[in-house]
Image (spheres, helix red, strand yellow):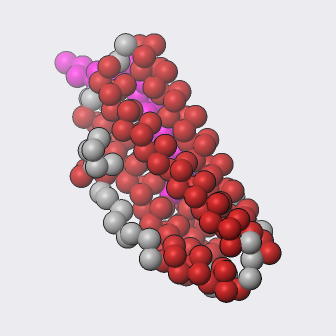
Amino acid sequence: MNTNRLSANMEKALSDQMNKEIHASHVFLSYGIWADDKGYQGIANFLYRHAQEERNHSIKFMEYILNRGGKPKVEAIPAPPADPESLTACFDGVFKHEVDNTTAIYRIVDLSMEEKDWATWNFMQWFVQEQIEEETLAQNLIDKLKIAGGDRATDESLFTLDKTLQEAPNDVPLAQDATGDNP
């Protein structure tokens, strides 16, 4: 008996998003390594934590597909982009990546509505909310760097920014513990 409650199109879209989240994890890990190498350990730690959060998102997609009777497909993950040339480029890259991810999330929401797959529509609402938070977080990084002086920031301003991000909460939740109220 076939117990898969996902259409072939939906299963593929969800698997593709699972892989997109894994790619995001690699991008942020790569940016973190770049920042660490440049001496920005606070920014690096922030990016490493964000990389772990993106990995957790991929696991959340994997678990959902399996719970709906589907089989997620792990694909080859593209290499992360080249190292950024500056903190501005790094933070702009984080923002662009989050906006691209939001677009992909919306496509799955659209597909769930088209197919009247209300279970998937409901599941995706967590990610819609999460992307609002992710884009805001990325925008705040850009804003903080601008306040510090952007690419012309003083060493003291960059030190303060680095320290601020070092002290940001280090509470990356596990995917299986996430709820709508506690993403």
Residue 92 painted magenta? no
Return the residue nearer the eye: 145 or 2.
145
The spot of residue 77 in percent (x, y) is 56, 51
Query: Looking at the magenta stretch, what is its main secondary structure?
Result: helix
Quadrant showing the N terminus: top left
Q: In this view, does 117 lie to the left or right of 109?
A: left
Q: Please give the name of the residue rendered at 44% of the width and 66% of the height, measured from the top-left corner.
A: 49
The spot of residue 53 in percent (x, y) is 42, 57
Residue 12 painted magenta? yes
Return the residue nearer the eye: 140 or 175.
140
Q: In this view, does 78 lie to the left or right of 173?
A: right
Say whether residue 83 is visible.
no
Q: Quadrant of residue 15?
A: top left
Q: Which residue lies furthest to the right in this view?
A: 152
Q: Please give the name of the residue rendered at 74% of the width and 82% of the height, measured from the top-left corner.
A: 154
Total numbered labels: 0
The spot of residue 42 in percent (x, y) is 53, 78
Q: In this view, does 144 lie to the left or right of 172?
A: right
Say whether residue 160 is visible.
yes
* In the rendered image, the vertical position of residue 74 relative to residue 162, given as above or below: above
Q: Please give the name of the residue rendered at 66% of the width and 79% of the height, measured from the top-left corner.
A: 158
The spot of residue 11 in percent (x, y) is 41, 28
Q: Quadrant of residue 60?
A: top left
Q: Which residue lies furthest to the left in this view?
A: 1
The magenta region covers: 1-25
* In the rendered image, the vertical position of residue 88 relative to residue 13, given as above or below: below
Return the residue nearer the eye: 110 or 183.
183
Q: Which residue lies furthest to the front in this view?
A: 147
Q: Please give the name of the residue rendered at 67% of the width and 86% of the height, measured from the top-left corner.
A: 156
